[in-house]
């Protein structure tokens, strides 16, 4: 019971200053917006719900022992800019702002009314004998009933004691309902929790896939490739001392070993090209364009990105250029890449016959899936007769 009273009283003590603070921020922000000074104040007002939500989840422990975890994610980067950018894009931030407005305008006045009815009025009735003694003649209990004798005063006090005992149970029920509303608005949504876990597991899968691919590349480079190099050298040395009848067969074996070595190097380069690891996505795209069956113009100005982003973008571009060479009938293609407003945007355009349909089970489906792992998107514009434009975007 005492915990319920403490919960409601602390709500009143938190809500009244919150109302004043939000009003001051809103008025000052609106007034100063024409000179741009008000914009940070309005942004601060929008984030008011974040600390309010944290305090309210802590206050819930007074009546609800089950902990309420925060619905917010941890920023991937350090610094206030990354924190603010993430908070403004989370649904939880806006739910907390709505709760802060509800607390400032409705909930704390309602808590005040409930406390006044359940405790204030009975408490004033219980204190009637003291009031009568202080006034020395007569008093009015709860500003309503005239009390001029100690008999009436003690009778009023007894009625107040009975009334407070009767109202304590409804007070506790109201406090529990109030806490349930707070939990409903401020606890993480189950769907959001599942989505966050899916996002984290998907990131772990991407990292594990990249690590496994690097391991296979390393094993092929340090194992099979070195053995083939040694075999090719031995065949070359054997040809020097072999009789003419055997030299021809050794030459064929030597050439075959060299061809296998070339193919293995191409395979290793396809698993994870060294130019991507050493020089970044821009140079890797230029290298892929040089290998394309169709002449490709490259216009790419990109910084370095995280390995999963560079890997996904590189293989998506390479797959797109392979599709151009196999299916489009194009004579030329163009790759343009930019990094703007936190998004990597790459456009692959060709002058082929068009008609590419991502829903027809083509390689575009796999390309879209590759980007979706990093929350990226693929847009296809390919009318019959062309041109075909693939636009890839990855937030990073």
Image (spheres, rainbow, N blue to C red):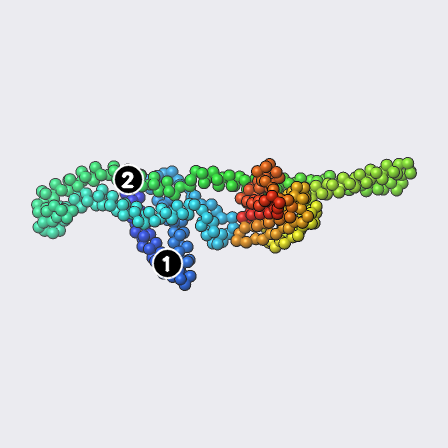
Residue at the image position 49 percent from the left and 39 percent from the top? 197
Quadrant of the rendered image containing residue 367 = top right
Label 2: how many residues lie within 10 Å, few (<14), some (14-19) or many (20+)?
some
Is 257 placed left or right of 290 in the picture? right
Residue at the image position 27 percent from the left and 45 percent from the top? 110
Residue 19: image location, x then y, percent? 32, 52
Identify the residue under disc 1. Answer: 30
In the image, farthest residue toward the bottom:
35
Is 76 placed left or right of 276 in the picture? left
* Element under disc 1: helix
Residue 20: image location, x then y, percent? 31, 55
Is 302 placed left or right of 99 in the picture? right
Identify the residue under disc 2. Answer: 174
Q: Is any part of residue 46 visible from this angle?
A: yes
Label 1: how many residues lie within 10 Å, few (<14), some (14-19) or many (20+)?
some
Residue at the image position 13 percent from the left and 51 percent from the top? 134
Residue 149: image location, x then y, percent? 8, 45
């Amino acid at each position: 019971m005492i915990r319920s009273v403490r919960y409601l009283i602390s709500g009143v003590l938190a809500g009244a200053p919150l109302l004043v603070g939000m009003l001051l921020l809103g008025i000052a922000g609106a007034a100063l917006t024409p000179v741009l000074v008000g914009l940070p104040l309005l942004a601060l007002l929008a984030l008011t719900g974040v600390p309010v939500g944290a305090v309210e989840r802590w206050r819930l422990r007074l009546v609800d022992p089950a902990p309420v975890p925060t619905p917010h994610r941890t920023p991937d980067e350090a610094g206030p800019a990354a924190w603010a950018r993430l908070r403004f894009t989370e649904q939880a931030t806006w739910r907390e702002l709505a709760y802060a407005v509800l607390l400032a305008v409705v909930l704390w006045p309602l808590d005040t009314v409930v406390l006044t009815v359940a405790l204030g009025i009975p408490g004033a009735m219980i204190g009637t004998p003291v009031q009568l003694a202080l006034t020395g003649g007569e008093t009015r209990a709860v500003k309503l009933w005239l009390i001029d004798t100690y008999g009436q005063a003690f009778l009023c006090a007894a009625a107040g004691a009975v009334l407070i005992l009767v109202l304590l149970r409804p007070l506790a029920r109201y406090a529990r309902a109030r806490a349930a509303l707070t939990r409903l608005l401020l606890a993480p949504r189950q769907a959001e929790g599942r989505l966050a876990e899916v996002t984290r597991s998907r990131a772990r899968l991407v990292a594990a896939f990249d690590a496994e691919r690097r391991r296979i590349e390393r094993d092929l480079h340090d194992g099979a490739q070195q053995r083939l190099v040694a075999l090719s050298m031995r065949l070359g040395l054997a040809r020097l001392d072999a009789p003419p009848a055997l030299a021809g067969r050794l030459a064929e074996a030597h050439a075959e070993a060299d061809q296998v070595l070339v193919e293995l190097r191409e395979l290793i380069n396809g698993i994870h090209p060294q130019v991507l690891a050493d020089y970044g996505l821009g140079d890797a795209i230029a290298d892929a364009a040089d290998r394309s069956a169709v002449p490709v113009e490259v216009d790419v100005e990109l910084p370095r990105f995280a390995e999963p982003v560079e890997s996904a973008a590189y293989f998506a571009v390479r797959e797109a250029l392979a599709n151009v060479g196999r299916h489009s009938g194009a004579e030329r293609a163009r790759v343009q890449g930019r990094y703007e407003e936190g998004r990597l945007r790459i456009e692959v355009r060709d002058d082929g016959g068009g008609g590419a349909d991502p829903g027809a089970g083509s390689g575009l489906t796999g390309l879209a899936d590759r980007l979706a792992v990093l929350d990226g998107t693929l847009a296809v514009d390919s009318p019959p007769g062309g041109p075909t434009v693939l636009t890839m975007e990855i937030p990073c």
